[in-house]
């Protein structure tokens, strides 16, 4: 399980933009890396829209938000287009990175799968972990946390 102050696991994941992204691509400022279960579902849609709506605030705070799920890039594109999302979505079809970050486990009645966790990373280190986040409140909590850090 990833702890605050630990080195962030590196990744190489394909994005909705067609490019391969890794941790080093986000070395300037904060990376808000959030893991979510499934595109086009109610909670995940709310969470992604909240992050998209907070893009300007996050940028002013020196942060970039990126969502990760096991959905493929094509479904990410549909999700982004249908919901008007402005954030980068990355695909982890094998859940390898999801598991490395400790965002995989028992989700109660939904069985095993991606747990809605958010990690704030700076300079390759995990500076804050929010576990089992509320999709409605997550982006606001992250913005408030970053305001206190700046």
Image (tube, rainbow, N blue to C red):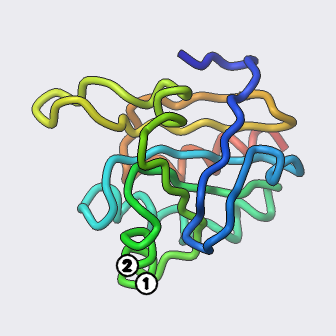
Apparent side of residue 34 relative to residue 11 in the rendered image (left or right): left
Kindly indicate the quadrant of the structure image that contains residue 127: top right
Residue 30 location (% of width, % of height): 78, 46
Residue 40 quadrant = bottom left
Q: Which residue has dot 2 on it?
A: 78
SS at circle 1: helix
Q: Is residue 112 above or below residue 140?
A: above
Which one is nearer the viewer's eye here, 144 or 19?
19
Residue linked to disc 1: 81
Vertical order, 89 against 122 (above or below): below
| Front in this rendered view, residue 55 or 81 | 81
Image coords of residue 124 (percent x, y): 81, 33
In the orientation shown, which residue stands out farthest toward the front?
A: 94
Please give left or right for residue 2 compared with residue 5 in the image.
left
Q: Are discs 1 and 2 less than 8 Å apart at CB?
A: yes
Q: CA distance from mark 1 to mark 2?
A: 5 Å
Q: Residue 50 location, x and y as percent?
A: 47, 64
Q: Residue at x 49, y 34 (%)?
A: 96
Q: Residues within 10 Å of mark 1 (few under 14, many from 20)?
A: few
Q: Secondary structure at mark 2?
A: helix
């Amino acid at each position: 399980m990833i702890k605050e102050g630990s080195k962030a696991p590196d990744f190489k994941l394909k994005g909705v933009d067609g490019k391969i992204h890794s941790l080093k691509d986000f070395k300037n400022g904060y990376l808000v890396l959030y893991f979510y279960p499934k595109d086009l579902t109610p909670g995940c849609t709310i969470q992604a829209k909240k992050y998209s709506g907070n893009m300007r605030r996050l940028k002013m705070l020196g942060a970039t938000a990126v969502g990760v799920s096991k959905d493929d890039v094509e479904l990410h594109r549909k999700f982004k287009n249908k919901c008007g999302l402005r954030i980068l979505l990355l695909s982890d079809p094998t859940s390898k990175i999801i598991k490395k970050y400790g965002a995989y486990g028992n989700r109660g009645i939904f069985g095993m799968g991606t747990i809605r966790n958010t990690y704030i990373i700076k300079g390759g280190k995990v500076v804050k972990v929010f576990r089992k986040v509320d999709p409605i409140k997550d982006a606001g909590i992250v913005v408030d946390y970053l305001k206190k850090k700046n």
